Image (tube, rainbow, N blue to C red):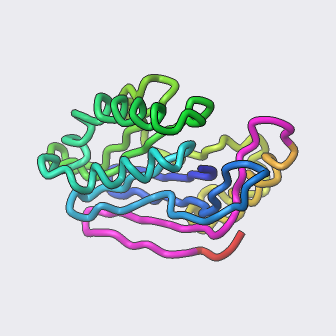
């Protein structure tokens, strides 16, 4: 998984991702969605790192009948992600060399506000409440020349800058490409759209 951009405040969540699926220089790249909307939970799930974890986790959350919103999912996410990660590592030993971070964004039934959470494999998927504002993964070192206040219109420019930054790395490079996909959640509902090719 590669570029993940997200903006949150009390009333909305905007998530932008690229679509490139890249395993190694020895395998052909593919394309995938890296953020999914789950309308009945008023929630968006996104991820960086392991694509297989994201795919399996999204399916599990979607079919979990007891969860009713982002806070209810958070209550059991850590243990469930730990268990799933262990199963996947046993099934796919190559995953032991990877990391993964899962992001949940949604409208809380308790407060009526948007809540965001991150669960990182390097922290054993401990629940981490996210602050409001703009998140950029991978972090962009040179932020010049980008109109940050125009997000999500600036998402393609941010991803192009990330691509340039990552292409200069000799190790731990993040591959970004495909198209820019945006998922937008407000208290009134969802919208999803493409912002074109990278």
Residue 127 rendering spot, x and y as whole percentages: 35, 30
Identify the residue at image location x=87%, y=45%: 168
Residue 5 in the figure: left or right of residue 164: left
Indicate the quadrant containing the C terminus: top left, top right, bottom left or bottom right. bottom right
Which region shows up in magenta? 169-194
Residue 177 belongs to magenta span: yes
Question: Across the whole image, how many numbered discs are drawn on residues?
Answer: 0
Let me know if residue 130 appears in the view: no
Q: Nearer the viewer, residue 3 or 31?
A: 31
Quarter-of-image position of residue 138 = top right
Determine whether 147 is above or below 198 in the image: above
Q: Nearer the viewer, residue 54 or 45?
A: 54
Determine whether 192 is above or below 94 in the image: below
Identify the residue at image location x=44%, y=49%: 54
Residue 69 rendering spot, x and y as whole percentages: 20, 49
Residue 184 rendering spot, x and y as whole percentages: 41, 65
Quarter-of-image position of residue 149 = bottom right
Residue lying furthest top: 123
Identify the residue at image location x=50%, y=57%: 34
Let me know if residue 38 appears in the view: yes
Residue lying furthest left: 66
Identify the residue at image location x=50%, y=52%: 6
Determine whether 164 is above or below 92 in the image: below
Residue 85 in the figure: left or right of residue 160: left
Quarter-of-image position of residue 185 = bottom left
Residue 42 rendering spot, x and y as whole percentages: 25, 59
Residue 73 belongs to magenta span: no
């Amino acid at each position: 998984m590669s570029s993940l951009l997200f903006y949150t405040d009390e009333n909305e969540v905007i998530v932008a991702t690229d679509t490139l699926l890249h395993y190694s220089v020895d395998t052909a790249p593919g394309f995938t969605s890296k953020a999914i909307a789950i309308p009945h939970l008023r929630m968006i799930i996104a991820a960086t790192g392991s694509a297989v974890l994201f795919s399996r986790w999204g399916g599990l959350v979607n079919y979990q009948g007891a969860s009713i919103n982002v806070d209810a999912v958070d209550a059991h996410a850590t243990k469930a992600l730990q268990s799933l990660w262990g199963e996947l590592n046993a099934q796919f030993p190559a995953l032991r060399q990877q990391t993964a971070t899962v992001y949940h964004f949604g409208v809380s039934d308790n407060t009526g506000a948007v809540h965001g959470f991150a669960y990182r494999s390097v922290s054993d998927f401990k629940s981490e409440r996210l602050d409001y504002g703009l998140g950029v993964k991978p972090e962009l070192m040179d932020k010049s020349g980008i109109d940050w206040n125009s997000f999500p219109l600036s998402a393609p420019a941010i991803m192009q800058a990330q691509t340039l930054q990552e292409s200069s790395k000799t190790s731990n490079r993040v591959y970004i490409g495909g198209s820019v996909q945006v998922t937008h959640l407000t208290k009134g509902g969802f919208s999803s759209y493409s912002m074109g090719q990278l």
